[in-house]
Amino acid sequence: MTNTIKKLKLSITILILSFSYNTLSAQGVTIDEGSYKWIAELPKPVKSRSILPPSASLENYAPSVIDQTGTPMCASFALSTIHTMNYARNNNIRNIEEIDKNRFSPSFLYYLFKDENTKGMSPFEGIAFMSEFGLPFANDVESDIFFPFAERRIENCYPYNKNDLLNDIKKGSQYVLELNSIKSCGELKEFGKQKIFIVNHDILKSELSAGNPCLLGASFGPDFFEKEQEFCYSETEGKSVGIGHAMVIVAYDDDKYGGSYKILNSYGKDWGCDGYTWIKYKDLTLLDGYIISFNGKDTYKKSDKKEIDNFLNEIYAESDRTLEFIDDCKEELNNDSNDIYDQVMNLCKTVLAPKYDIQDKEDTDEFCECFSIKLIAEYYVATIFEEETTEERMNELSHECYIEFLSK
């Protein structure tokens, strides 16, 4: 895929998110009452008595930056990145090629736990699974044929059968998330009806200096997602209104911009500074979200396939989800234009259609097809003439399609 097409996809994604963020509760990571209840039940953080170093970094254990652009897979990507980093640290693997060889699947949890309504997922379902069976390796799941290492979407085309799924899980089950290691790096407080997570910077820095990368799940304003960043740092753009996103905190430095955390995102190396950004301590103190840390451990044994099968059956019995296998896979046209169209359609269905209260599937498809074709054509023309497609213009396009929809 060319850089132009990648830029187009990212720009359209950001444009839609920017247009709709005032009505969007989450895009990729679910931040809801269930999340806050789970956080509140974690042990209360204890202030570290040790003197913390002025800086600490786990970047040497991080895998290569990957790109989730156009998909709501941030929680799945972030959890797999932390699991990979913990595995690399516990096995003293610092060579990035070796780290990538032992990378855990970035999209597997999304395949299992995506919410069909919001298209995002709750990290806590993933954490529960990881504490029992870890994660399959990317080489066994995506390999070189599925996103983000290729264009094809895994949630439509994986696995080949139930036995294939169980085998992949079994291979990765020797290394699991250590449930007792989970720590909340702050406390949840209620101010009227508003819940705010107050970050404990001593706890957060203590976890990082101890070698534990941290999961950041919170709401950010749309400007946070812009590719270009001056001085390689980002502002969180507010606490109670924004777009839900999950990332990984990999470092801190008391001298960087007056004190900042280094964040690994999942928007590719073209975003921020080689895929990373810095957020100042003061901008990461009050969150509509949470920060947690956890470690991994080697069980020195692989889980029994029957045990895995029983666990999966329990999960799906308690929800409306169904497992899909390769027979259900819809062949996708492997070309750039179709890929962009799919991304815009997906974002329209999850963001714009609900904004206009369009709920019927056929109506949603009709409205979003109109909007997607108009937006892509508009953006291509604007790009050729070096013009900008504004939010106001997007608003006009969506209203045009809505009027057309109503008149039929």
Image (cartoon, helix red, strand yellow):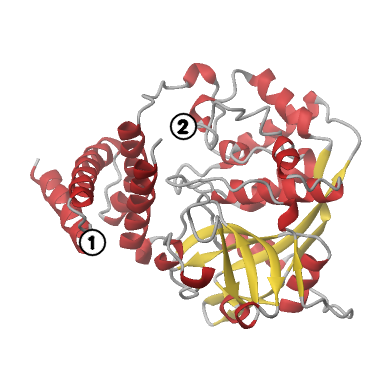
Q: Which mark is residue 390?
A: 1
Looking at this view, is 34 or 281 the one in front? 281
Q: Secondary structure at mark 2?
A: loop
**What is the crowding at mark 2: few (fewer than 14 residues within 10 Å), some, or many (at least 20)?**
some
Q: Which residue carries the number 2 mark? A: 151
- 298 is higher (above) or lower (below) than 274: above
Relative placement, left or right, of 187 versus 154 is right
Residue 196 visible somewhere in the drawing = no
The spot of residue 121 in percent (x, y) is 55, 48
Q: Residue at x 83, y 77 (%)?
A: 52
Q: Residue at x 60, y 46 (%)?
A: 76
- 84 is higher (above) or lower (below) than 321: below
- 287 is higher (above) or lower (below) than 39: below
The spot of residue 79 in percent (x, y) is 66, 49
Q: Secondary structure at mark 1?
A: loop
- Give the amino acid type for the residue marked by disc 2 in the picture: Glu
Seen as rendered, the residue at the extreme left is 407
Q: Residue at x 89, y 79 (%)?
A: 50
**What is the crowding at mark 1: few (fewer than 14 residues within 10 Å), some, or many (at least 20)?**
few
Q: Which mark is residue 321?
A: none
Relative placement, left or right, of 202 versus 118 is right
The spot of residue 205 in percent (x, y) is 75, 72
Relative placement, left or right, of 126 versus 289 is right
Q: Could you tell me which quadrant the N terminus lies in?
A: top left
**What whole-number distance in Å separates the C-alpha atoms at marks 1 and 2?**
28 Å
Rendering quarter of residue 144: top right
The spot of residue 96 in percent (x, y) is 71, 44
Looking at this view, is 131 or 193 the one in front? 131
- Give the amino acid type for the residue marked by disc 1 in the picture: Thr
